[in-house]
Image: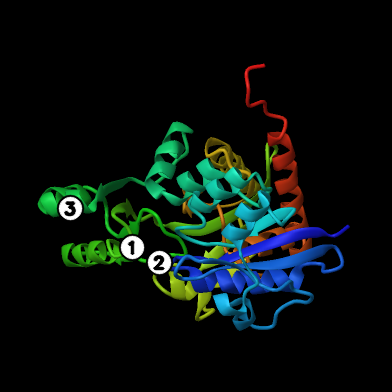
Amino acid sequence: MKKKIGLLYGGKSAEHEVSLSTAKAVTQALNFEEYEVHPVFITMDGEWLIGPRLTAPVDTIDQLQFGSNKTPNNMINFIQAHNESPFDVIFPLLHGTNGEDGTVQGLLEVMNVPYVGNGVLASAAGMDKVIMKQLFEIAGLAQTPYIYFTRSEWESDQEGILAKCVELKAPLFVKPANLGSSVGISKAMTREELIAAIKVAFQYDRKIIVEQGVAGREVEMGVLGNDKPRTSVAGEIKPVTEFYDYDSKYKDGSTALIIPAELPDTVVSKMSEMAKSAFKILDCSGIVRADFFVTANEEVVINEVNTMPGFTPSSMYPLLWQHTGVSYPELIDQLIGLALERHAEKQKLQYNKD
């Protein structure tokens, strides 16, 4: 029998369009002889809608967007009426808040349905850059100096916060604590640029982080697995712009990706060790992309992990695995298998004292 796959995409997030592109790519790689594919679209208003079953890959993202008048079922109502999920496994293809941050994962846990990727804790901690860095510190992972603060703290003590920022060495990178795809991130060299960057970041989150820049190569590595994760080859990013921003990732195609990265085996081994350590300290499962800086003297500094990295065939994570010997369709199959494996393990847990 075919496995019933619910492709969950869209979302009430600044990365809504990125998610649609990912969903389109996944439909083009899924084996429709093996999977029964159902689109589950979350609108920008946060409404969950189940569309007609897909019998072939979609050609445009317009085919993945539909309104209530075209939709046979609202997912939440369907589940309440049937007291079960209509799917064997959910494949969340959501980026950013309200999808990659543990919120949707929590709902899927309550529904007790298998789903691809990281659980509640890993998703939430991986989305919040501050919590992530605090956990990295516990794990003893080398990282760049940083400070963080909330909007209320900024409003009550701007000069004090700016003084702390000055203690970091420019360039500084100002980021919303909870967002991905480089949305809301700015580079600052001067006090004026820093203040402007903070204002931009606060448009996307109530908490922001200011990091000291690292003079080094940007290198990434994929992690795949559950309790025994394995790592891919390393890949280097060489953006034409000052840093790897949203446009570089998704629009202008100007960034060069060098896979495998030209690095000594000792550096790649260190990255692999650190990537697995980060994966485990966050209690990750399924999929993670670990991002690093490698300095001129071959010091490895972890920047962050992404618990739902870009997932089109041209995205770094699938490309890293392609160069490791795992094709895009095979990667999707393995992630689905890991989701079912993790869910089966959870079903062994006992929820009463007897």
**Which three-letter amino acid code belongs to the residue tagged 3?**
Trp
What is the CA distance from the residue labelled 1 to the residue labelled 2?
8 Å
Q: Look at the image and tell me whether residue 81 can be seen.
A: yes
Residue 213 to residue 192: above or below: above
Between residue 295 and residue 218, name the one nearer to us: 218
Spot occupied by residue 179 in the image (x, y as percentages of width and height): 42, 59
Spot occupied by residue 122 in the image (x, y as percentages of width and height): 53, 43
Tag 1 secondary structure: loop
Tag 2 secondary structure: loop
Between residue 321 and residue 176, name the one nearer to us: 176
Q: Disc 1, disc 2: CB below 8 Å?
A: yes
Q: Which mark is residue 154?
A: 3
Q: Does 232 sit left or right of 298 as displayed?
A: right
Q: Which residue is mark 2?
A: 183
Q: Which residue is mark 1?
A: 204
Which residue appears at 73% of the width and 62% of the height? 322
Q: Disc 2, disc 3: CB below 8 Å?
A: no
**Mark earlier in primary sequence (2, 3):** 3
Q: Disc 1, disc 3: CB below 8 Å?
A: no
Image quadrant in which the N terminus is located: bottom right
Select label 1 or label 2 by which is in front: 1
Tag 3 secondary structure: helix
Residue 117 to residue 36: above or below: above
Few, some or many residues within 10 Å of mark 1 (<14, 14–19, 20+): some
**Which three-letter amino acid code belongs to the residue tagged 1?**
Tyr
Spot occupied by residue 130 in the image (x, y as percentages of width and height): 37, 45
Which residue appears at 47% of the width and 58% of the height? 98
Which residue appears at 49% of the width and 51% of the height? 103
Q: Look at the image and tell me whether residue 323 can be seen.
A: no
Between residue 301 and residue 51, name the one nearer to us: 51
